Image (spheres, helix red, strand yellow):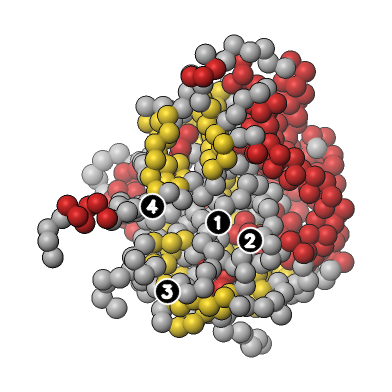
């Protein structure tokens, strides 16, 4: 049996909750709820938040509590953020890969 | 004397908060460092404002007691120097190195209480690096902090009593497609139950009512299964397992919460000078402490980071550590409180030992993992590469040496999630108990340069 799958991993516990915040992730717009985490916002519309640097497999966070570093994102200034520990803010511009790499 | 005292508590979970409370009641004002933005811990994690409206559903009859506890904790923290978003990433010469909202800082202490908790302990399996696989603890944090279900069809898999708690929390928030695949046989749990009942009747019975709640809610429950593999093209699509009777089964799923118990977070304690002993029941290394949690002249350890015991044990241990600390300051410990919390702690530890016996860490599975199974998620090191390293004649077979040869444990999580399995693979070759991965600061990845300004100014002109 094949189940139809949504094209995102996370499902908000309140599906109708407003998503007034907007930030950019790899050049695309992501919406978020007030108090949302970057990771929850990204995974609410995507299947992953980046790729593993060695084998290119998708990464989508793992421990969700700041320990595994698998939801690492980079901000405009090249700073590394943990998506699960950082609150979403309007106007952020984030990337799933560090700057300066070949991509 | 008092003016020279600087007490630092690392971690504002149940153990750190209990220690803080005892110290505040004695008229002291400890510094409390917390890496996350909120006090509370993990299992007892505070709800984000997004999840808070669901408090009554999530906590049921306990909702009021939990709210009272959180208020009391906040009242204590108001009398502390409470610093959130602050990571203690190294410790040397009675000094902590911090990274907080304002950048790097050093903090010298006269007395240090470490209560930094635990994370999930995991046995790798084929497919466990696919997007959609999360830790069991993470699946609960998904609800409480991220206000999200990890998927539409969720399988909770592994060997842990928390499988049932996590599934119940999903059920209470309205999720209706849940499966629990418990690798521990029902017979083992039945055998351990009398001991659990003896040590902690209330908690043991709560476990039973949890299972009844899951059955009523239509959750699929399987005990004694073998987890074979997680499959999917670019994300989780199904989990294949074998029932206790040997039937091959498939659970369609878009998310898996995986957990095999808890692993004490011991890095900071090691840097602060703690020594370690292997606990054969828990099959992990715990720091050595006395009965009150003292681990050195200026060092106390409490809660799951000292020894896996859960929130109630952490509360008792935090109080005891603080009493011991007060004694070291020349104050008389409260004998009644010490006696009461020693008894509480002993009961909780007896209960946890029985639970650990029921929900076993599947140590032996490490030996039978196929060579192509990824053990180190960060650096993508396979079981086969680890075994190849064990075969090299270049020196003693020891877990730190295998780490340096293979890079298993050298990635960004710093061995937190591959370490237990790596230890077991090495142990299966040596026949010795698993070794302990050495700690190295920084205990989490930190930016080498937090504020690039001054260094850029010193650099060459562009």
Residue that label 2 marks: B145
Give the labeled residue for mark 1: A65
Circles 1 and 4 on the same subunit = no
Of badges 2 and 1, nearer the viewer stands 2
Name the disc covering residue A93, or none. 3
In the picture, measured across the screen, residue B42 lies left or right of residue B114, that is: right
Instruction: Say above or below: B203 vs B272.
Output: below
Say which element carries label 4: loop
| C-beta proximity under 8 Å, tags 2 and 1 | yes
Query: Which residue is nearer to you in this view: B48 or B422?
Result: B48
- Labels 3 and 2 share a subunit: no
Q: Which mark is residue B445?
A: 4
10 Å neighbourhood of mark 1: few (<14), some, or many (≥20)? many
Mark 3 or 1: in front is 3
Kind of element beneath mark 2: loop
Q: CA distance from mark 2 to mark 1?
A: 9 Å
User: Pointer 2 and pointer 4: residues touching (CB < 8 Å)?
Assistant: no
Please tell me in which quadrant of the rendered image residue B108 appears.
top left
* Chain identity of mark 1: A
SS category of the residue bearing label 1: loop
State how far apart marks 3 and 2 are (Cα): 22 Å
């Amino acid at each position: 049996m094949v189940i139809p799958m949504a094209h995102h991993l996370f499902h908000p516990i309140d599906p109708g909750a407003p998503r007034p915040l907007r930030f950019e992730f790899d050049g695309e717009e992501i919406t978020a709820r007030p108090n949302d985490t970057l990771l929850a916002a990204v995974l609410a519309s995507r299947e992953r938040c980046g790729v593993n640097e060695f084998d290119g497999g998708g990464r989508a966070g793992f421990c969700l509590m700041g320990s595994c570093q698998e939801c690492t994102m980079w901000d405009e200034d090249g700073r590394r953020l943990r998506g699960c520990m950082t609150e979403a803010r309007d106007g952020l511009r984030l990337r799933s890969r560090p700057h300066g790499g070949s991509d | 004397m008092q003016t020279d005292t600087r007490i630092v508590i690392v971690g504002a979970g149940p153990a750190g908060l209990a220690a803080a409370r005892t110290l505040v009641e004695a008229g002291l004002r400890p510094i409390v460092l917390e890496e996350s933005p909120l006090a509370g811990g993990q299992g007892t994690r505070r709800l984000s404002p997004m999840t808070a409206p669901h408090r009554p559903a999530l906590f049921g009859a306990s909702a009021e007691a939990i709210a009272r506890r959180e208020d009391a904790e906040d009242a204590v923290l108001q009398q502390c120097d409470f610093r959130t978003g602050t990571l203690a990433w190294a410790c040397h010469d009675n000094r902590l190195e911090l990274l907080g909202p304002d950048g790097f800082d050093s903090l010298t202490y006269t007395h240090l209480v470490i209560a930094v908790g635990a994370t999930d302990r995991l046995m790798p399996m084929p497919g466990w690096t696919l997007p959609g696989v999360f830790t069991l603890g993470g699946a609960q944090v998904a609800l409480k902090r991220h206000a999200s279900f990890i998927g539409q069809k969720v399988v909770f898999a592994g060997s842990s009593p928390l499988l049932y708690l996590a599934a119940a929390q999903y059920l209470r928030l309205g999720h209706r497609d849940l499966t629990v695949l418990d690798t521990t046989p029902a017979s083992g749990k039945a055998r351990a139950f009398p001991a659990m009942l003896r040590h902690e009747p209330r908690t043991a019975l709560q476990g039973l009512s949890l299972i009844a709640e899951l059955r009523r809610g239509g959750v699929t429950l399987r005990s004694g299964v073998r987890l074979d593999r997680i499959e999917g093209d670019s994300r989780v699509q199904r989990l294949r397992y074998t029932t206790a009777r040997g039937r091959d089964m498939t659970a369609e799923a878009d998310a898996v919460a995986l957990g095999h118990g808890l692993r004490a977070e011991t890095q900071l304690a090691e840097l602060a000078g703690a020594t370690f002993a292997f606990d054969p029941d828990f099959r992990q290394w715990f720091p050595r402490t006395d009965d009150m949690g003292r681990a050195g002249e200026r060092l106390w350890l409490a809660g799951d980071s000292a020894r896996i015991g859960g929130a109630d044990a952490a509360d008792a241990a935090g109080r005891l550590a603080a009493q011991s600390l007060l004694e070291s300051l020349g104050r008389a410990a409260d004998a009644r409180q010490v006696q009461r919390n020693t008894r509480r702690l002993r009961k909780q530890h007896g209960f946890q030992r029985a639970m650990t016996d029921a929900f076993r860490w599947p140590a032996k599975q490490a030996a039978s993992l196929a060579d192509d199974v990824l053990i180190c998620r960060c650096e993508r090191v396979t079981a086969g590469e680890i075994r190849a390293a064990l075969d090299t004649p270049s020196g003693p077979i020891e877990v730190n040496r295998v780490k340096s040869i293979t890079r298993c444990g050298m990635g960004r999580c710093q061995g937190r999630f591959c370490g237990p399995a790596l230890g077991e693979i090495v142990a299966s070759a040596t026949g010795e108990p698993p070794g302990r991965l050495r700690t190295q600061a920084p205990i989490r990845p930190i930016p080498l340069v937090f504020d690039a300004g001054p260094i850029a100014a010193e650099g060459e002109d562009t």
